[in-house]
Amino acid sequence: MKTAEVRTRVEPKLKKESNKIFKRLGLSESEGVRLLLKGLVIHQGIPFEFKIPNKETVAAMEEVEKGIYSKGYKDVDEMFEDILNEKDASNK
């Protein structure tokens, strides 16, 4: 596969801060830029939002990776019933 070089100038602080975020997302600077460029082409605009997950989300992802699930459902209907019941209980 042939590649072409992309060069851009940014403020040193922006480069440093963005690289910290790329690292936390598990991406190199080059991978992050490639994702942006591919997304721009596919969606003809900025198609995505990258955010660092909060503590609750990270804990849930770690549970899934370890095969630990706090809840299991036999089907989607049972899952939605549980979600709606939790929502109703929190509105009271």
Image (cartoon, helix red, strand yellow):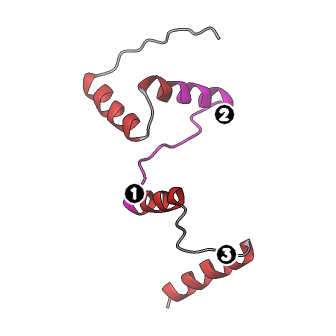
Relative placement, left or right, of 77 versus 4 is right
- Mark on residue 43? 2
Is the Cβ of the residue at disc 3 closer than 8 Å to that at disc 1?
no
User: In the image, what residue occupies the spot 43% across and 11% down?
Assistant: 7
Mark 1 residue element: loop
Per the image, the residue denoted by label 3 is 73
Determine whether 41 is above or below 9 in the image. Answer: below
Mark 2 residue element: helix
Which quadrant would residue 38 be assigned to in this image?
Answer: top right
User: In the image, what residue occupies the spot 49% across and 27% down?
Assistant: 31
Question: Local crowd at mark 1 within 10 Å, few (<14), some, or many (≥20)?
Answer: few
Q: Amino acid at mark 3?
A: Tyr
- Foreground tag (3 vs 1): 3
The residue nearer to you, when weighing 65 against 21, is 65
Determine whether 44 is above or below 6 in the image. Answer: below
Residue 41 x, y percent position in the rendering: 65, 26
The residue nearer to you, when weighing 1 against 66, is 66
- Quadrant of the frame with the N terminus: top right
- Mark on residue 54? 1
In 3D space, how far apart are the residues under numbered discs 2 and 3 (Cα atoms)? 35 Å
- Look at the image and give the residue range highlighted in magenta: 34-55
Q: Earlier in the sequence, mark 2 or mark 3?
A: 2
Q: Earlier in the sequence, mark 3 or mark 1?
A: 1
Mark 3 residue element: loop
